Image (cartoon, rainbow, N blue to C red):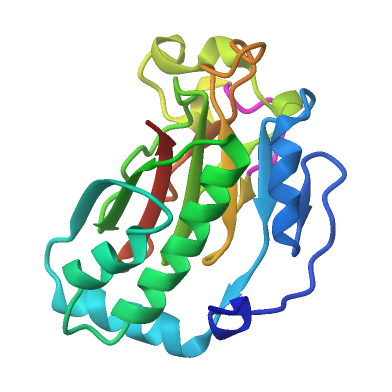
Amino acid sequence: MSLDTVIEPVPVEISKVQPIDIAPGILTEIYQPQYNLALWKRTLTADLTTNIEQLLQEQSHLALVQTVTPDDAAQWIKSKLEGHACADALGEDIALIVDMFCCLFDVREAGLRLTALDTPMCPKFHVDHVPCRLVSTYVGTATQWLNNDDVDRTKLGAGSLGQPDHVSGLIKNGDVIQQMQPGDVALLKGSGWEGNEETGLVHRSPQRLNDERRLLLTLDLV
């Protein structure tokens, strides 16, 4: 499958803090020790977005969890979404991302989650205790993150004393919250990455806007 059947090119201002680009090869930058995020900017086709929105209207509950390989991911997604207009294109796109993930980390399989959400999964800023996680929001408001220099890590978790992020002192400066866009594919380095124990990417689920539903894909090392 050609990438052109799923995504449309989009101009983007390249970040001077984290590696961000419209070329998928940017994801290899996650191996650089100075980075805890690598972000591939892309825009889904209008047809795929519309068909996924229809899926979310028709499916009151969607939570697909499976260990997949680049060879079986597409067919597994298609079988689970059989009858929905987005099944083929979404299955092929996810298989492409699984293939990239497995090649990048030299593994044969990945832990896949494809979930429809109508409430924030992790509404407070936090760090994942995994080596690295791939995150992509197909429809809906996407993941937010903070650069290292903008975070007081003593205010994470219990350090917030139960206060919301904007009150706890976690965010050192003003309007510094960064945000992915639908279609973007990001690698988030966690505290389980060797040498990154104290600098895992601080991120959170976005606040819900009106009655929107999100379709979130995550991949983990198995």
- The residue shown at (67%, 11%) is 195
Q: In the rendering, at what x and y percent does residue 60 appear? A: 12, 67
As drawn, 64 above or below 7: above
- Magenta portion: prevailing SS class: loop
Q: In the rendering, at what x and y percent does residue 182 appear? A: 52, 66
Q: Nearer the viewer, residue 16 or 67?
A: 67
As drawn, 54 above or below 190: below
- Outermost residue, right side: 16
Using residue 89 as the reference point, say whether residue 57 is left or right of it: left
Q: Nearer the viewer, residue 65 or 203?
A: 65
Q: Which residues are magenta?
A: 170-177
- The residue shown at (43%, 63%) is 94
- The residue shown at (59%, 48%) is 186
Q: In the rendering, at what x and y percent does residue 197 appear? A: 59, 11
- The residue shown at (18%, 67%) is 80
Q: Nearer the viewer, residue 78 or 167?
A: 78
